[in-house]
Image (spheres, grey):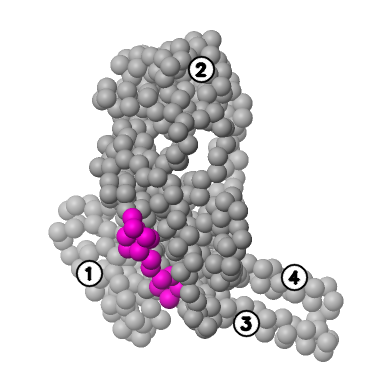
Amino acid sequence: MRAVGYLRVSSESQVDGNSLAAQERLFYELCKSRDWQPVAVYREEGKSAHSESIKNRPAFRQILEDATKRKFDNVVVHTLDRWSRNLRITLESLKTLAQHDVGLVSITENIDYSTAQGKLFTQMLGSFAEYFSESLATHVKKGQGERARSGRHLGGIPFAYLSCWSGKDGQRILQCDPEHPGGVHIVEDEGSVVAEMFRRYAGGGTTTADLAIWMNQQGFRTRNTKRLPTGSGNERAGPRYFTNASTRNILHNRFYAGSVRHGKDHLPGDHDPVISTELFEAVQIALAKNSGRSATVGRRKTRTYLLKGLARCADCGMNLWAQTYKNGRSYYREQRASRSHGICPAHGGSIPCEIPDQQVGEIVSSIKLPKDWEKRALEKIEAQDEVARVIAERERVKERLKRLGVAFVDGLYDEAEYRRQKATLMAQLEVLVISEVDNAKEACRLIRDLPRLWTTATLPDKHRLLTSVLDGVYLDLKNRHGIISLKPKAPFELLNIDDVLVATSGGENGGAFCWIGAVD
């Protein structure tokens, strides 16, 4: 049995004492007495287990994540309050452990959830957690509806507004005296610039990309709270440069005209509006009129591009635009200063569509499959730990179904009990599936048939084939070398692509490329 220890002290003064060392010593002694294999120790120094949020307990989050990957069989704690002092977190964490057949052992209380009976009890606690979660969701939804009907905002506060309240350690503190209507107030400079955005767009002669560039030049940044990719490929939250999309979101947001949204309904808000309802409606008409149009392109409303939605800048990783100019030439181009993370090193760059399009055709034509490739790929997929566990569990359930049938024939069960137990086992079989395996099998078939399908496919069909296989095609705009790398969709990451694709120079303008994300 593989075991890990979770050690925690709740104050900085305990960190320097013997508490962590004592917990660790007792963990190793327990493993030795039970002949368990200690594989890791997770330390949480000076972190409270009472808060409803676990965002400040990184080791706790990590141990739950590793439990879902079946990296160990049991978690050992010194006492249960080292694990959690909050009932909701306790129930939800035990549910996570139960779902992945991981036991929890408390040394001091002599509580052992690593046994079959203990794991059954853990699953029961998990069921209670699920019930409480669903009940809480119902009450939260009801409360949100009442809040919206009273004119209060829901969710994140839009750019140009700030809340009159701050929160820390679960406490709400009023920052404004008195509280503004709706509990939010306008940030003066941001409110002015948002109003100007609406006026400029309603007046015509500007685009959402122009507004993004203007906002960035004025020094404004978004209120981004989500983790988004940066140019280096990492993810981070925090203020970002305005983009075409973020300015469009502002222009579509009725909050600025004094409304709050609940589901599909827009209700009168209690907050102060930035613009009038008439100006907002005028902008909506202009947005609908200008949708899909650009002064730099021809009047043809819809065009098909081979790499539309797939082309990425190799320098910043952001999407590229595909456009056909009035002279009939088509390009994949960078969006200049309207990027979300600053000016791209290749800003203003472009590449004729025919260069990467031709390279894609050569790449597809160069696909070669060894005779036993598909068999080896599937064997590699099915050899993964989680896949092997599910397959073994399916075999155990099937064996139980056989024994149940024999017992019914021998008269050990009446028909009602037989049907009940059979339905339970069949339900277990339905959930014991690994979707990645089925997806990867379909990926194998598509890779195998891709060169043949490509030769007879139309341009829209080729685009659909590529979007089925790839998440991104990264292009070099500075030197116009075309394709630098390809990023596959998730099912194809499971395949051993190195045995499948043969690199091509891409002709006169081409360069070597690589396949990102393949399993080694």
Disc 2: which residue: 283
The x and y percentages for residue 362 are 45, 63
Q: Nearer the viewer, residue 220 or 237?
A: 220
Earlier along the polypeptide chain: callout 1 or callout 3? 1
- Residue at 75%, 70% (x, y): give it: 423
Q: Residue 423 got which mark? A: 4
Query: Label 3 crowding class (10 Å Cα cut-off): few <14, some 14-19, many 20+?
Result: few
Disc 1: which residue: 22
Give the spatial CA distance, label 3 vs label 4: 17 Å
Q: Amino acid at mark 3?
A: Glu
Q: In this rendering, would 50 be left or right of 287?
A: left
Q: Amino acid at mark 1?
A: Ala
Earlier along the polypeptide chain: callout 3 or callout 4? 3
Q: Which segment is the magenta one?
A: 497-513
- Comparing labels 1 and 4, the label whose residue is closer to the camera: 4
Q: Quadrant of the N terminus?
A: bottom left
Furthest toward the left, the residue is: 16
Q: Amino acid at mark 2?
A: Val
Labelled pair 3, 4 in contact (Cβ < 8 Å): no
Q: Amino acid at mark 4?
A: Ala
